[in-house]
């Protein structure tokens, strides 16, 4: 699954004692991406995901590019935050200097436009099949429909200490109002349904995209045809023998939540 | 009286050190640390000091003295430096002492090695000598012999 098959052993890179000897014969691999390059990081154990604030390490750690900083975990312990780019350079997964350039020119023309992309496939409105690049997805979540609240007409959910706006993709792509989406969710809450949410994060803020069902993650070279270009849709491509619309997540959010992340990201840049 | 200075004192491998009290934020017992792989060995780790991440510097290693014997744990002298708050790991905490300038002397030529860099002066006390530690230099690794 890891392209190029490169595995990086974290205990070796950090020159730490022990580790690397799994009890049950299985090893844990975290698949990471530095620029366009995927690699597998072998670790002793995987704990959990947690949202954190990274504090920089002091002057005493100057030149230590393996870590991005540190943070204090819920149990009070200090955790070191790996710098994926620095780690990848140290392990020679990517070479220094050229890496940032390749990001700019990367996905576009490489290999005559047949560069593979990792895509998240999902369905909305029952039969509409859509995809977005997995790199734009922060997380996938499930919420019971009755956790969804309203702020004005806007559907929101309390999520990791934030009030996260929710966008029903089916409604938004049909150009329906947020109020319509809210009414639909109300019915779903009464039916005790679970909502599938794709969390998209930019500029430190998150937006949840409500979809019917997450289908799959595929890695494919796709050719997007700009047929039937509509609001929030970049075009269509054939993925796994089925016509799949490419969601324009940035455009859509800029369109319907102008005060949200899209604009704040622009200001930050 | 007004010329008297107050020092927070501590022991490192039998040597009696002092840091001026106004540089000391607090003295705390041993704290669990998160080791930082690949960092300079003088840096022993990171401490959670009431929500603040503080770097702990091993004074024994900084002074090229041997490590503490197995089973002993160091104490933290938390000091304020130009680069922020740092913890100096020491063997044992002493008293806070008032010392007067007439007992002060420049460090003798006979001190050699790293100590020469880090000790800015000496106070002659009744039964022993108090070495004044330069916390800024102790906290910077650039003066350390490679």
Image (cartoon, coloured by chain):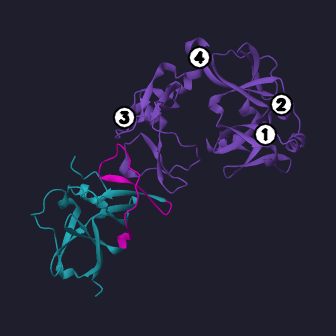
Crowd rating for badge 2 (residues with CA inside 10 Å; few <14, some 14–19, many 20+): some
- Residue under label 2, please give it: A173
Residue B41 lies in magenta, yes or no? yes
Find chain A in the image and tell me its colour: purple
> Vertically, is A5 above or below B122?
above
Badge 3 is on which residue? A12
Callout 3 crowding tier (Cα within 10 Å): few <14, some 14–19, many ≥20: some
Which chain is indicated by disc 2? A
The alpha-carbon separation of the residues under discs 2 and 1 comes to 21 Å
In what element is the residue under mark 1? strand
| Bounds of the magenta segment | B22-51
Earlier in the chain: of badge 2 and badge 4, it is 4
Colour in which chain B is drawn: cyan
Q: Which mark is residue A115?
A: 4
- Is residue B115 a member of the stretch shown in magenta? no
Q: Position of residue A104 (x, y in %)?
A: 55, 26
Point 65% across, 42% down: residue? A265
């Amino acid at each position: 699954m890891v392209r190029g098959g490169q595995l990086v052993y974290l205990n070796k890179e950090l020159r730490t004692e022990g580790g690397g000897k799994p009890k049950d014969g299985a090893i844990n691999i975290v698949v990471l991406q530095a620029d366009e390059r995927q690699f597998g990081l072998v670790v002793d154990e995987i704990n959990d995901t947690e949202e954190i604030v990274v504090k920089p390490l002091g002057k005493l750690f100057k030149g230590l590019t393996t870590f991005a900083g540190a943070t204090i975990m819920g149990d009070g312990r200090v955790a070191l935050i790996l710098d994926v780019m620095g780690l990848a350079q140290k392990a020679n997964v990517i070479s220094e200097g050229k890496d940032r350039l390749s990001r700019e020119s990367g996905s576009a023309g490489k290999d005559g436009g047949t560069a593979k992309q990792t895509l998240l496939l999902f369905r909305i409105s029952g039969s509409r099949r859509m995809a977005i690049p997995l790199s734009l997805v922060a997380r996938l979540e499930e919420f019971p429909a009755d956790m969804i609240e309203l702020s004005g007409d806007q559907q929101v959910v309390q999520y990791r200490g934030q009030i996260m706006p929710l966008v029903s993709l089916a409604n938004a792509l049909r150009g329906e109002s947020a109020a319509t989406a809210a009414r639909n969710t109300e019915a779903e809450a009464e039916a005790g349904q679970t909502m599938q949410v794709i969390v998209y994060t930019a500029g430190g803020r998150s937006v949840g995209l409500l979809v019917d069902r997450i289908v799959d993650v595929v890695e494919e070279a796709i050719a997007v045809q700009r047929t039937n270009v509509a609001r929030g849709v970049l075009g269509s491509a054939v993925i796994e023998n089925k016509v799949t619309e490419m969601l324009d997540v940035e455009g859509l959010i800029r369109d319907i939540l102008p005060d949200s992340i899209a604009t704040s990201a622009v200001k930050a840049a | 009286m007004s010329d008297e200075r107050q020092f927070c004192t501590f022991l490192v491998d039998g040597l009696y050190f002092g840091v001026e009290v106004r540089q000391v934020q607090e003295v705390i017992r041993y704290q669990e640390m998160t080791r930082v792989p690949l960092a300079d060995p003088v840096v022993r780790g990171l401490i959670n000091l009431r929500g603040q991440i503080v770097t702990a510097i091993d004074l024994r290693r900084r002074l090229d003295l041997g490590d503490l014997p197995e089973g002993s744990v160091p104490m933290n002298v938390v000091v304020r430096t130009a680069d922020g708050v740092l913890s100096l790991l020491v063997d044992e905490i002493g008293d806070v002492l008032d010392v007067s300038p007439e007992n002060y002397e420049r460090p003798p030529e006979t001190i050699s090695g790293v100590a020469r860099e880090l000790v800015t002066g000496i106070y002659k006390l009744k039964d022993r000598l108090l070495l004044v530690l330069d916390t800024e230099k102790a906290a910077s690794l650039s003066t350390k012999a490679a």
